[in-house]
Amino acid sequence: MADAERAADLCALARVVADVVPVAGVGAVVLPGAGGAEEGACARSRLLRGGDVLLLTAGQDAVAAQRWRGGTRGEDPRAGLLLATWPDEVQRLLLGRLAPGDVPGAASSAGRSRWRAVRSLVRRR
C-alpha cells in the first residue's frame, strides 16, 4: 500500500492525474487519466531518478510497452513477456476488466496538492 501512496504522490508532483494500484510482485501500477500517457511516463521517470517507468498501452490488436528512465525513452520491452510474468490483475486493469477502486490499497493523485505530496514523501523516507 505504501508503494501506491508514494506513486500517487509522485504523480501529483508531476501534475499527472492517475489511479495507482498496488500489485504483488510489481510494486504499483499507475493508470493515467485520459490523454498524455507518454508525457506522464516521461515526467514520472524524471522524478524517479534511476528507476524505470514502463508504459503499457492496449490497442485494438495488441499491447505495446515503452521504457522510460530519467525523462528519456529507452529500448521498448516486449509487452507480452512483461504480462506473462506479472500477476493477472495487471492485464485485467490494463484491459479495463478491473476497476482501480476495486483493489484494496489503491490511491489516486486527483485532488492531491503538490505541497502535500512533497510533505508525504519526506515523511515516508
Image (tube, rainbow, N blue to C red):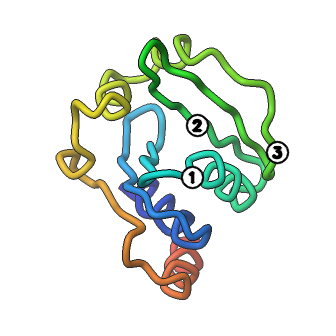
In the visual, does 101 lie left or right of 68?
A: left
> What separation in Å lies between label 1 and label 2 (alpha carbons)?
11 Å
Badge 2 marks a residue whose secondary structure is strand
Q: Is residue 113 left or right of residue 22?
A: right
Dot 1 corresponds to which residue?
36
What's the CA distance linking mark 1 and mark 3?
16 Å
Q: Position of residue 70 (x, y in %)?
A: 80, 51
Specify whether 22 is left or right of 103.
Answer: right
User: What residue type is disc 1 on?
Assistant: Gly
Location of residue 95 in the rendering, given as x and y in whole percent from the top left corner: 33, 28
The foreground one among 60 and 65 is 60
Taking the image as shown, residue 72 lies to the left or right of residue 40, namely: right
* Badge 3 amino acid: Thr
Question: Which label number is shown at residue 62?
Answer: none
Q: Amino acid at mark 2?
A: Leu
Q: Image height check: is 70 above or below 8?
A: above
Outermost residue toward the bottom in this view:
115
Is disc 3 surrounded by few (<14), some (14 to 19) or many (20+) residues within 10 Å?
few
Q: Which quarter shows the C terminus?
A: bottom right
The image shows residue 6, relative to residue 122, as above or below, that is: above
Q: Tag 3's secondary structure? A: strand
Residue occupying the point 59% across, 73% down: 13
- Residue pointed to by mark 2: 55
- Residue at image mark 3: 72
Q: Residue at x 37, y 55 (%)?
A: 19
Q: Residue lying furthest left in this view? A: 102
Q: Position of residue 50 (x, y in %)?
A: 78, 49
Q: Nearer the viewer, residue 46 or 28?
A: 46
Residue density around tag 1, few if under 14, some if 14–19, many if 20 or more, within 10 Å = few
> Disc 2 or 3, which lies upstream in sequence?
2
